Image (cartoon, rainbow, N blue to C red):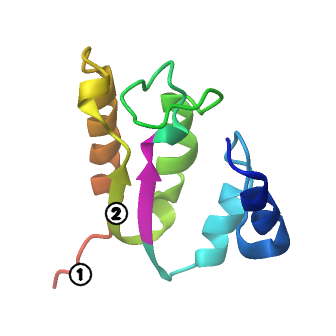
Amino acid sequence: RSGERAEWYWSAEGHTKIQKFSFAGLDETIASLASRPVYLTIDLDVLDPSCFPGTGTPEAGGVRFTDLLSAALRTIRGCRIVGCDMVELSPPLDPSGASTATALKLLREMLLALEKPYIQ
């Protein structure tokens, strides 16, 4: 949602695929992954600071928790997720604990999305 001019030019030259402020195109991206192993990372500052103030890099205009949960995490469950992480939670910046609770709910969903080991 923010960056230096050089970063936007670099992205525009085909180095990354940016979908600002939405998850449009996620279904197509997931379909293109087919059965390939996927490593999922969630940068928590994607969330709007009005619902997630506990980050060191708050930037207005982020997505809502329910959008991240339904549009992204539940959609990716069809992927072969083999590992995951999340970054940008800073509990001292949110003394209410709401950001920590939000991150833990997302972590639970991430763990549920992990590929189940093959059992005979």
Residue for point 65% across, 70% down: 31
Relative vertical location of residue 118 with respect to residue 61 in this rendering, above or below: below
Q: Is residue 17 part of the magenta span, yes or no?
A: no
Relative vertical location of residue 113 with respect to residue 82 in this rendering, above or below: above
x, y (%) of residue 53? 42, 24
Relative vertical location of residue 13 with respect to residue 120 in this rendering, above or below: above
Residue 17 is left or right of residue 79, and the answer is right
x, y (%) of residue 74? 48, 48
Circle nearer the N terminus (2, 1)? 2
Around disc 2, counting alpha carbons within 10 Å, would you say few (fewer than 14), some (14 to 19), or many (20 or more)? some
Secondary-structure class at tag 2: strand
The three-letter code of the residue at mark 2 reads Cys
Q: Which residues are magenta?
A: 39-44
Residue for point 68% across, 42% down: 2
Q: Which mark is residue 84?
A: 2
Residue for point 72% across, 51% down: 4
Q: Which mark is residue 38?
A: none
From this viewpoint, is residue 71 visible? yes
Q: Is residue 42 part of the magenta span, yes or no?
A: yes
Which of the two discs, 2 and 1, sits closer to the camera? 2
Residue 13 is left or right of residue 92, and the answer is right
The three-letter code of the residue at mark 1 reads Tyr
Q: Circle 1 sits on which residue? A: 118
Q: Nearer the viewer, residue 120 or 30?
A: 30
User: Hey, which residue is sitting farthest left in the picture?
Assistant: 120
Q: Nearer the viewer, residue 23 or 8?
A: 8
